[in-house]
Amino acid sequence: MKTALITGGAGFIGCHLCRFLLEKGYRIICVDNFLTGDRANIEGFKSNPNFKLIVHDISLPLELKEDVDYVLHFASPASPVDYAQLPIQTLKVGALGTHNALGIARSKKAVFMLASTSEVYGDPKVHPQPESYWGNVNAIGPRGVYDEAKRYAEALTVAYHRVHNTDAKIARIFNTYGPQMRKKDGRAVPNFITQALANRPITVYGDGSQTRSFCYISDMIEGIYKLMLSDVNEPVNIGNPDEFTILDLAEKIIELTGSKSRIVFRPLPADDPKTRCPDISRAKQLLKWEPEVGVDEGLKKTIEWFSS
Ligand code: NAD
Ligand code: UDP
């Protein structure tokens, strides 16, 4: 039986990864300090003898006696609202947390994976974004704490691969949504769905012409799993290239929920990327992966979860 240590395992993506790997027969060690995670996300695993929770801040060193085959480093605030409220914790978990997680992988001779992000491309000047694009990031802007932490984390991950031969993977994750997102994490999908279900105004920032490409969680987990088992050490974009405007997203959610909500426009946050869409040629070619769940189907499942 293989053991996977998942930092941030009580968060949105982390808890889906825990469930998926438990079902595949892995033993899971979840390391989380519940900074932005939710205990309810892992409640169902606690009776499983193959699941172990360590409540710990991974920005501090962690000594483990047991063997570990995979270290999947997913701990980090991820919503722009969260990382604006937690700037120093965000920088620390990207820098010190990644260092500690890499240290565990090195000492256990485990495969390492960094949950990186499309935010390493910043407000991109190349569209769609291939992995070869270096990005356009404002280091001292409000998103800099997250973007630069992840860029440093990528640099450290590559250094461990080059210097210590750590089998290190970098998943550049694009906007992902689905059940188990925190209702109040401030991201567009949970905001719009909770507003629509309550028939409250839908808050579109700016004029809503900025674009995103949203990937349903089950597709994301499949992509992460394929990367984890692969021999690929270069960064790989994982996301859904179906791109639309945020205004389109708001209208779609109103339609799918049958809501009476109206759309209201609020100021656009500073440095909010104007466009974002992954070029997933590398994932298609090297991982034989591409998303399968369309936005209507994914949103319906997410709305169902939020309404229960
Ligand atoms: P989330 O906030 O739901 O989960 C993050 C988890 O990490 C939480 O359980 C939180 O308590 C934990 N955590 C944070 N700091 C910690 C620390 N110092 N020590 C231990 N645990 C800590 O976020 P998410 O959406 O599930 O994102 C997970 C990862 O994926 C993050 O690294 C994020 O940067 C990356 N990512 C997510 C998206 C997305 O659309 N969801 C997009 C790009 C990248
Ligand atoms: N957004 C919005 N209204 C909201 C929340 C977000 O218009 O209530 C916009 C936000 O400004 C951004 C897009 O939706 O342009 C996606 O935001 P999210 O926070 O989901 O993720 P991001 O892609 O910015 O990391």
Image (cartoon, rainbow, N blue to C red):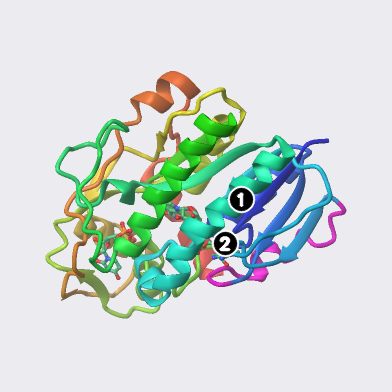
Q: Quadrant of residue 249?
A: bottom left
What residue is disc 1 on?
101
The picture quadrant where one finds residue 228 is top right
Which residues fall within the magenta stretch?
35-49
Give residue 201's position: percent from left, percent from top. Answer: 27, 78
Q: Residues within 10 Å of mark 2 (few under 14, many from 20)?
A: many
Q: Residue at point 61% right, 61% down?
A: 58
Q: Of all residues shown, which one is farthest toward the front?
A: 163
How many badges with numbers are in the image? 2
Would residue 288 be seen by someone viewing this image from the given angle? no
Determine the CA span between mark 2 and mark 1.
17 Å
Q: Residue at x 32, y 80 (%)?
A: 200
Residue 302 in view (yes/no): yes
Q: Quadrant of residue 282?
A: top left
Mark 1: few, some, or many residues within 10 Å (few <14, many ≥20)? many
The residue under label 2 is 11
For label 2, being within 8 Å of ligand 1 is answered: yes
Q: Position of residue 245 (x, y in %)?
A: 20, 53
Q: Is residue 297 left or right of residue 255?
A: right
> Farthest residue in the right direction?
49
- The residue shown at (57%, 68%) is 37
Query: On the rendered structure, is 281 left or right of 92?
Result: left
Q: Residue furthest top?
A: 285
Amino acid carrying mark 1 in the image: Ala
Q: Could you tell which of marks 2 and 1 lies nearer the N-terminus? A: 2
Residue shown at 35%/73% (left/top)? Answer: 84
